[in-house]
Image (cartoon, rainbow, N blue to C red):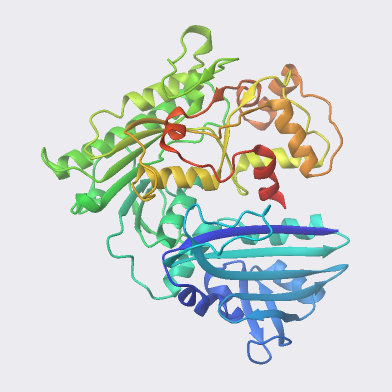
Amino acid sequence: MTWTRTARQEFDLDPAEIWAVVGDPRRLPDWQPGWAEVELDGPVEVGTTGRLVPSGAVRSRLHRLAAGPIRIVELESGRRLSFEQPQPGGRWRFSFTVEPTPEPGTRPTPELTTQPSPELVEGRCLLTQQISYEGIVPGANGTVIGDELADFAVRCARLRELTGQSPAAGGLRVVIPGGTGLLGRHLAGDLVSRGHQVVVLTRTVRDDLPFVQRTWDGRTVGPWADGLFDEPDVTAVVNLAGASVGARPTRRRIAEFTASRVDSTRTMLDAATQALGPDRRLAAWVQASTTAIWGDAGERHCTESTPLPYGAEALPQMTGVASAWESAFTDPPAAHHHVLRTSLVLARDAELVERLSTFARVGLGGPMGNGRQWVSWIGLADWLAIVRACLGLEPEITIPDGVVVAASPEPVRNDEMMRLIRSEWRRPPAPPTFRPMAQVGGWVMGTDPALGLTGRHATSRVLAETGHVFAQPDLAGTLHDLWS
């Protein structure tokens, strides 16, 4: 059996600058925190052996007892490096590939046997890291080693710093309130890897993140704002701040969900307005929102112009929270501004994705309720590309100001989503989780069962009209990318 995981990140540097770090396995611990030490018994060449020691006392001790020496098995200088390590019942293979980035629209298409070489973007490159296991127990080993690709964009931001290169001339300075959350970490890592500066606003500084972090309370303008908007023409805001809505929707918690979003939005607007005055504007402002603003939309097909629901359809933990969130975003002092209504983001390290895969693997991957509710979703790579386009960093796409729906053009029914997840894990059909069971399960797990029992068919007319091309348009392919 074979288990494989792949991650990619684009950089604003020449391949040689990234290869200078990636091409030496001994530097792996410098940008991959899961590894404590890599030693080689000779030069970096095919056949050289050595040892790889993971971080963590228990993990390191077990690894030393069970794992054999690593061995470099592939080396194409300046482009590709692979090494293997035997384990009980199988072996791991770690591969790194660095190559120039092709121009948009010139990437090779796999169905053609002969095709012209793509035009390459000067001064940009793509890093691909692949981890695979071949043996008799890929699942158990993969659960441990697979974490080495979590937060890959953050690791790549650390990698770019190791090259010693300064941020790109003409790059943006992007302020990200809520930047320590899942989407914030990926966005910050992606932007830093591409040569931009990032400032994360957070209530608690995280030492494991290689970004400039400033503490704030999300309610008051304070020292965190000092000098933040001194260069407005090259400064942007992506406001992702807000408490997680996964908890049970009691009145008190709904009030907390709302306040965390409304207060942080108003505070950011106040800080920027005070610093800029009446005549200056930031380059761009992306304000987070959610497609859950349409509540349980049934068979209605929602786009940017679809009216918000009212009455029983306007669930307070969805429409109530999101509509107040968007209403707080008034008169943004920015040359361009967008309200990004994001659907379910499929990322390898997303809590909901991990939970759904766990359910499927243990035989509980049946549909929620009757399974007919729509699920709108988006792959992480596409979400990042849309945010970059809103910031003006995707030259081939110009998105008009206003509401933008961040969702794949192909929503699916809940039962279809669960079928595809089971298929990826090679699991047979599973019984549905009926509404009473989901409600009891939500109470036990401290989550909101409405997150799985309700749905909406949300797509973007705005993105279609701009010509945006989704890298991950279909759910089957996106799930395969996550778990293969």
Residue 372 higher or lower than 477, as above or below: above
Residue 445 seen by the camera? yes
Instruction: Using residue 50 as the reference point, say whether residue 331 is left or right of it.
Output: left
Instruction: Using residue 60 as the reference point, say whether residue 155 is left or right of it.
Output: left
Q: Quadrant of residue 11?
A: bottom left
Q: Residue at x 53, y 8 (%)?
A: 312
Instruction: Using residue 210 as the reference point, say whether residue 439 is left or right of it.
Output: right
Q: Residue at x 46, y 76 (%)?
A: 17
Front one among 467 and 95: 467
Residue 178 seen by the camera? no
Where is residue 290? Give x, y as percent. 47, 30
Q: Residue at x 23, y 46 (%)?
A: 222
The furthest residue to the bottom: 42
Where is residue 428? Give x, y as percent. 87, 36
Where is residue 244? Give x, y as percent. 51, 35
Front one among 100 and 58: 100
Where is residue 29? Give x, y as percent. 57, 74
Q: Quadrant of residue 94?
A: bottom right
Residue 254 higher or lower than 16, as above or below: above
